[in-house]
Image (cartoon, helix red, strand yellow):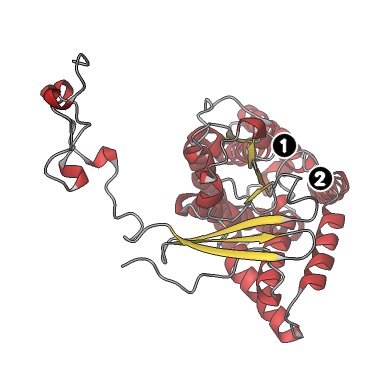
Amino acid sequence: MPTFVYMSSCDGCGECVDICPSDIMHIDPTTRRAFNSEPNFCWECYACVKACPQNAIDVRGYAEFAPLGHSVRVLREEGKGTISWKIKFRDGREKNFVSPIRTTPWGSIKSPSDYEAPMPDAFKTQELAHEPESLNIDKLPALAPDNLKHRVV
Amino acid sequence: MFTSNPFADLTVFLPPIAMQVYIVLMIVAVAVGTVLDMLHKSSGKFFARQMEKSKAAATRELSGADIASLAVKTIAIEIATSGEFCNPQRRISHILMFYGFLFYLTTTIVMIFGYPAAAMPVPVVFPILWNIGILMILIGGYWFFFFLRVNVAQDGQPIFRLVLADLFIVTLLGSVTFAFIWEIVQTAGNLTATKIAFGLYIIFTTLLFGSVRWSKLAHMFYKPVVAFQRRLEEANGSSSLPMPSTRNEVR
């Protein structure tokens, strides 16, 4: 189900352009509002739907189960750490879902740029930058060579 | 320099009646452009259809007082303080341009129609407000143009690749920039430079008000309608958005 933008609600902030992992949310050169430039390449991750502060992005349901007259709307509440979905079917039925997004306050997780740059020696290890401390564990579980199948090493 | 009527000195080569006719023509151009824009986008039909849908899906009846209160909130938040913008920098830039444009436009009309002759002393407040308006537009406008335009800041387009959406901001900035230059060279007493700067000012101003059909100027008329409609839908229960969650997951 690819996404689309209600042009009358969009204020052209660009949050969806920043967050789209497929790089298909772009700015219309005539209206300076966001639009999904390649709905067929949409990963359907709905990152843009959840990120839009104006609730201007909706989901175009597939015709098999949500034909004309449906709507799939989402409300993200950062303060409460929740995301609510409202699905309206053409026959008038309505389904509502509320899911937790996170349990810590919005903005409290350090972004990668907040960490110090890794030392050159860190590139020789198998861990990613700042692992395992950033995962709040002492050591990453790993198989020792003698645990592996014969001839793998 | 900032306390005298800049239009009064123009009477050396431009009669006041010509300036007054020009203002009327620009008002007509904005009205015609807005109507053409509405016809082209079917905005009127769209809003009427949204209103009907909202009425049909309403779960609560709103009284006249409720609707009046929603209208007041729309005026106070979305119109007066540009509350629609989630990005505070864009909001400040928009407020600067909005009030700057109001000061500039109102004082221009007052000075041209109220004090057309060079001999008529104009209250100092009007030229000062005219200049403050211009400065507000210049600050808010150039800030927006160079740093805040979403297609440049977020979409990574080059600053000087102009698109149709830039028509409004470019003509607005062109108009007030040359208005400011014209005022400076006119005060310095250079007639040739005054004529050139004033000519460029008129070209950009004509483009600004004459291009409403293609530019974003018409948004100042329909954006408040959208904001009011959204508030109405939330209040009468017809909004398609989910109800706010009653759970709080943040610990």
In the rendered image, the quadrant that contains the C terminus of chain A is top left
Residue receiving disc 1:
B202
Residue at x 64%, y 37% (from the top left corner):
A36
Mark number for residue B22? Answer: 2
Corner quadrant of residue B183: top right
Which of the marked residues, 2 or 1, is nearer the chain's N terminus?
2
Residue closer to the observer: A86 or B191: A86
* Residue A126 can be seen, yes or no: yes
Corner quadrant of residue B251: bottom left
In the rendered image, the quadrant that contains the N terminus of chain A is top right
Residue at x 79%, y 56% (from the top left corner):
A69
* Horizontal arrangement in the rendering, residue A146 relative to residue B90 (left or right): left
Residue closer to the observer: B140 or A94: A94
Residue at x 50%, y 29% (from the top left corner):
B156
Kindly state the secondary structure of the residue where label 2 is placed: helix
Neighbour tally class for label 1: few under 14, some 14-19, many 20 plus, Cα within 10 Å: some
Above or below for A51 versus B50: above
Above or below for B62 versus B83: below
Kindly state the secondary structure of the residue where label 1 is placed: helix
Residue at x 15%, y 27% (from the top left corner):
A147
The amino acid on which the numbered mark 1 sits, given as a three-letter code, is: Ile
Task: Please state the horizontal and vertical placement of residue B107, each as a whole percent of the image.
Answer: 65, 57
Corner quadrant of residue A103: bottom left
* Horizontal arrangement in the rendering, residue A81 relative to residue B119 (left or right): left
Tag 2–tag 1 contact (CB < 8 Å)? yes
